[in-house]
Each structure stands twice: as structure tokens, then as C-alpha cells.
Amino acid sequence: MSLAHSTAAAIYLDTNRVISPISPLVFSGFIEHMGRAVYEGIFDPASPHADANGLRTDVLAVLREVNYRAMRYPGGNFLSGYRWLDGVGPRDQRPRRRDLAWQTLETNQFGTNEFIEFCRQINTEPMLGVNMGTGTIQDAANLVEYCNAPTGTQYADLRAAHGYAEPHNVKLWCVGNEMDGPWQIGHLEAAEYGAKAREAAKMMRWHDPSIQLVLCGSSSTFMPTYPEWDRITLELAWDQVDYHSMHYYANNRDNDTDSYLALTAEFESFVDTLTGVLRYVKAKTRSKHDVYLSWDEWNVWYKATTPDDFRGNWKEAPHLSEEVYNLEDALVVAQWMNVFLRRADVVKIACVAQAVNTISPIHTTRDAVLKHTTYYPIMLFSKLASGIALDVGVKSPHYETQKFGAMPLLDVSASYDEATGASAVFIVNRSQSESLPVTLRWEDRAPQQIDAVHQMSGSDPKAFNSLETPGMIVPQRVAPPAVVDGSAEMVLPPLSFTVLELHL
Ligand code: AHR
């Protein structure tokens, strides 16, 4: 890694430089019927921690701490073969089925009503998906009736018969999952999906005009149909939807940590491109309506490499894609969340994929929960970023990367909550070897003091937490620097994520 030392690092903060309010929904999660996310993850009657409904109380406690604002469910690829009626009603009458997406035995012991109960337990908004693979637009509309309509008609009465006389009032709905992918059950071409999604959305809204709908966007920037898929589907369904989804899984397969730590270049370019598509389609359709981005699957996912990481061999709750995250992964996750703040004008929903066990920041055994390194940046952003995102001025030395050329060593975002005066600054030092002295300068109003500094760092980018050593990579409280004449000086260790908490 070569450093250009000529630039002194500085961060300029000004509460007049506003990007946009931060949508709390960017701190959301995703639970799919995949591997041990649902079974053994959140629902495990055999665990000593299970409550009367079989929910894992220790997992619920951790999820409450993260405070996911919405939870997407039930998939994922699973969604595109899911018959929602399988998962409601008396448990002993629910069918056992082969889930073709993950080649897993699905018992249907956990379904829509159990998911709603789970969401209530962790105080999160349910975000339900409707099947656009094998499912019809009628099935999609029936599920909205089941969840949201007052009693008096077939599916609402079925809900009441299942113990829920009051509607669930589910507001957020995904119209299918990754329908651009040939791997998807019932994959469609863009024009077919756009038209089907539009018709499903119309029927769903006729049941409940207050719902908000997410159209399936590109599954990644690597899709050959990207970004034409996005243009075509949006042109067909624009006025019927509120959000357009984007999915992306990051990897360091080449073991090129310098480039890996600069992946925000890729994330921001994905947002830029889709923002351009949104503007184009709004203009072309002459619409007054706005559509925003829902980054409803994002995470690091690449260490799972064997076929058994992706297919369950028809077992119940197989161990699929249980990634172990290390320090460099946590730094990528922290920067990803910096992007959510920097692009708060257009990214309004973001769901970590997934919330428990499968590609997840937390891992369960029958009687324990482990927090991986990536848990901590997710929790710190969710807890501390509120109000508006600030357009931060950053001066930083650069370093060379193979994939993205020269990149700044610092990656920064900041929030300011006018209602409480609380502000937070989130800083990653991407250098693998160099500590970086940095000046923080408050341009309009300055804090009296920094209330707290949380810092994750380490010398080994591959260091990780385990059940034996759960505290290997966790945030430490470090002494806050003094604020003198509106400035503070800090030295950021290499490979570090630092969060400053203060009031303005
Ligand atoms: O989250 C795992 C899988 O990744 C989801 O099922 C699918 O939507 C994506 O390809």
C-alpha cells in the first residue's frame, strides 16, 4: 500500500449542509426460510431459551438491541415457490414440502402469523413478500386481504379463524424477489415481470390503498440485464410502486484487501446508476410520483463455497451459508452504512441479508448467541444515526487499489438530529498499516465536548469472533479528544472504524 502523505486528513462538519432526512428503514433486516435463519435461528422450541411460542428469547434480545426498523420475509429465493396458505392455520395440518430454492425440507411450522408475532416481539415493521414466481396475482391479492382486510370476507375471516380478528396492517410489501435471475423459480423476462408486478400491485392496493410496494430491481451490478431490467420494469410499473429494490453481496475472493476496503466505489456507482434510471423513467412517464431505492439485500457473502452451503439435501434447517465475519468485513459493512447516509436522498430502505445464522451478523447454537464482527457497526449505526445526513467535507490522503485506482483512506458519514441535538460521525480508516492523524472541524455550531468514542480496530484484517473468543473484535470505548475552538484532533489506527457521539 503506497500513501500520498501530502494531504493532511480533515473532516468538516456543518449542520447547514444537509443531504436529506435519514429514513429509519435503512436499518432493517431480512429473514428467509433458508438454512437456520428461521428454524433454530428465531424459532426453536427445543432451545432452553424458547418462550411459549417457540421464539428464542436470547435472539429476540439481541435483535431488540440492533433495533431493526423493518424485517423482510419470507424470502429470498424461497419466496418464489412459497404457497402462503401452507404456513397459516393449525400447525398439525400444515404440509411438509420440498423447498426447491434451497433443496430443503420445509415443515411450515413457522408462517405469516408467527412472523407477525415475532415482529411485535422485537418492535419491527413486517415487510412481506408476495410470490411472483409460481404465485399468481390473485394469490398476492389474497395475502393482502388475509393480512389487512377487516373481517367479513373469505381470507380476512380465515385470519380471524386462525386467532387474529384484528388486521395485521402490514404496510411494506415486496412484489416478488430477484425475478431477473435465471436461478429464480419462475424467472421472468423484464417486460413479463414488469407487467405482472403492475397488475399484482393494482390488486394489492385495491385491497389496501395505504400499502407501500417494492418492485424487484437488479439482483446485482453483474447481471447482464443490468440496468435495462430496471428501466423496463420501472417504465411498466412506475405509478404502482413506491420503491425499487437493489441487491448486492460483497466479497474478497481475490484476497485483495486494499480493493475490498474500497468497495464503496462500487456501491455508490450502483446507487448513482439506479438514481439515473429513476430520474429518466419519472421524466419519460411524465409522472408526479416518486420511487425510491430499497437496498433490501446487502451483506458480505463469499466464504461459503461448498455445494452444501447452498443446498440442504432435503434436510430440515440445514447449515447453509453460515459466514464467519472478520475485521475487514466489519469495515466494509461500516462503509456500506456510510453510503446509506451519504445517499439518504434516494436510499430509503436497506435490509441486512440476513438477520440470524444464514449470511448473518449473529450465529446461534442451541443455547448460545455469538455476535460476529459485523454485528457491531450495524448496531452502532442503528442506535446513533438519526435525523438528517450531513454532507461532510473530507480531505484525505489517498492509496492505490488494483480495482478502483486511487482511493481516499478515509470513508466518512455524519448525522444530526435537530430534535435532540444528537450528532454522530462515522469514520473508517482504510489503511492496513498507517495510523492517520485527523482534524475534525465544526463549521457552524461546535460541541462543548465529544460525549463518547467507540472504536473497532486490529492489526489482523482476518481476525474474527468465535464462541470461545467472542470479544476478539468488538468496539472499545476510547478517550474522547478535547474540542478546542471548534476543532478536535484524533489519531485513527489502521484498519479502524470510529464513531463519535456528541451534541450540538
Ligand atoms: O439471501 C440469500 C439469497 O440471496 C436470497 O434468497 C436471494 O434473494 C439472493 O440471491
Image (tube, grey):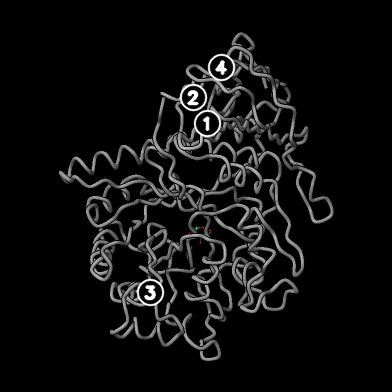
Q: Are marks 3 and 2 in contact (CB under 8 Å)?
A: no
**Helix or strand or loop: what does disc 3 sit on?**
loop
Residue at figure coordinates x 64%, y 11% from the top left:
5
**Helix or strand or loop: what does disc 4 sit on?**
strand
Q: Which residue is mark 3?
A: 167
Which residue occupies the foreground of this view, 283 or 158? Answer: 158
Q: Amino acid at mark 4?
A: Arg
Separation (CA) of disc 1 from disc 2: 7 Å
Location of residue 20 by image quarter: top left
Outermost residue to the top: 6
Residue 67 location, x and y as percent?
57, 53
Outermost residue to the right: 468
Q: Which residue is mark 4?
A: 441
Disc nearer the start of the sequence (4/2): 2
Separation (CA) of disc 4 from disc 1: 14 Å
Q: Amino acid at mark 1?
A: Ser
**Helix or strand or loop: what does disc 1 sit on?**
strand
Residue 248 location, x and y as percent?
49, 48
Residue at figure coordinates x 40%, y 31% from the top left:
19
Q: Amino acid at mark 3?
A: Pro
Separation (CA) of disc 4 from disc 2: 10 Å
Q: Which residue is mark 1?
A: 413
Which of the labelled discs sits on residue 52, or is there none?
none
183 sits to left or right of 305: left
Q: Which residue is mark 2?
A: 392
Residue 314 location, x and y as percent?
61, 77
